Amino acid sequence: QASWREYERWITRFEQWMDAEGISDPTIGEIEAYDGFLADESRTSYPWDNGQGRPAPPAYAYRTRRTAISAVKLWVRREYSRRIPESPSEICIGEPEPFDPTYLTPQEVDGIFTEAAQDCARGGCEAALRLSYDAILRASELVRVERDDVDLVNGTVYVKASKGSKNTEVGISDATVDALRAHIDAHHGRGRLFHNSYGRPWRARAWATHVLRNHCADGSHALGRHSPILHRLEGGQPFGEVYR
């Protein structure tokens, strides 16, 4: 949902840019010009603000412009029945920024689990953190886990993936099984597995904020995605298996 909202914003901005430039029939040339407009560091004004009253930056980063061009391509195909065969990477000026993920050591991860078990007032927090790490879950995937997705006998969880990934069954550790069993025994009759202090299922952004403020200063993505991927690869697990 967040991706589509972002696409909608960029489509609106493209329409505003076309109006300002007097363009009524966008082709690949106009889309390339739009990318150049976004990449121009000398720009001091835009036909839009950047949301919530913030001004647009002097230039948009390569990654942001890729998203913008992806949105525009879809819109042009829908509104004008015109397919743009070029990929965003063929249109966008410059090179992508290097990926430099933040991650934790295994000892730091274990410390987070221990502190959550001892100090966190939110029921099931330790189980949620452990499950996120074991199954390499995004926040949006963790909050969607239901009781029926977890097999405590075989030590697996069925992951309903987001961002175009494939649904899959993932093994979890004995410590995570124990934490989940204690949590489930204490909260019978729930569909979604994890709830906030108001008794409602966690939302992805709220869960990520909780982790950031209370458990991991590097954020839930570093704890649940970057760190377990790195630890599995360093432990000798084949890349293909980690990727799956």
Image (tube, rainbow, N blue to C red):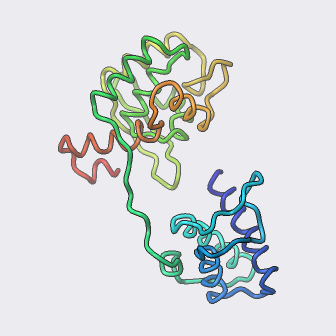
28 left or right, relative to 19: left
Above or below, comparing residue 6 to residue 124 in the picture = below
Using the rendered view, name the quadrant where residue 110 is placed.
Answer: top left
| Image spot of residue 157 (x, y percent) | 42, 33
Q: Residue 232 in the image: state x and y as whole percent.
A: 26, 41
92 left or right, relative to 131? right
Q: Residue visible at 52% across and 40% down?
A: 141
Tell me if residue 62 comes above or below residue 231 in the rendering: below
Towards the viewer: 161 or 69: 69
Q: Residue 61 placed where, x, y %?
A: 54, 66
Residue lying at 33% horizontally and 36% vertically, measured from the top left: 104
x 59%, y 37%: residue: 204
Taking the image as shown, residue 102 lies to the left or right of residue 230, namely right
Q: Residue at x 63, y 73 (%)?
A: 38
Residue 237: quarter of image: top left
Q: Is residue 18 left or right of residue 95?
A: right
Quadrant of the rendered structure where residue 13 is? bottom right
How many marks can you see? Answer: 0
Front residue of 228 and 22: 22
Q: Which one is nearer the viewer's eye here, 77 or 69?
A: 69
Query: Residue 28 location in percent, x, y?
Result: 62, 87
Front-most of 110 and 156? 110
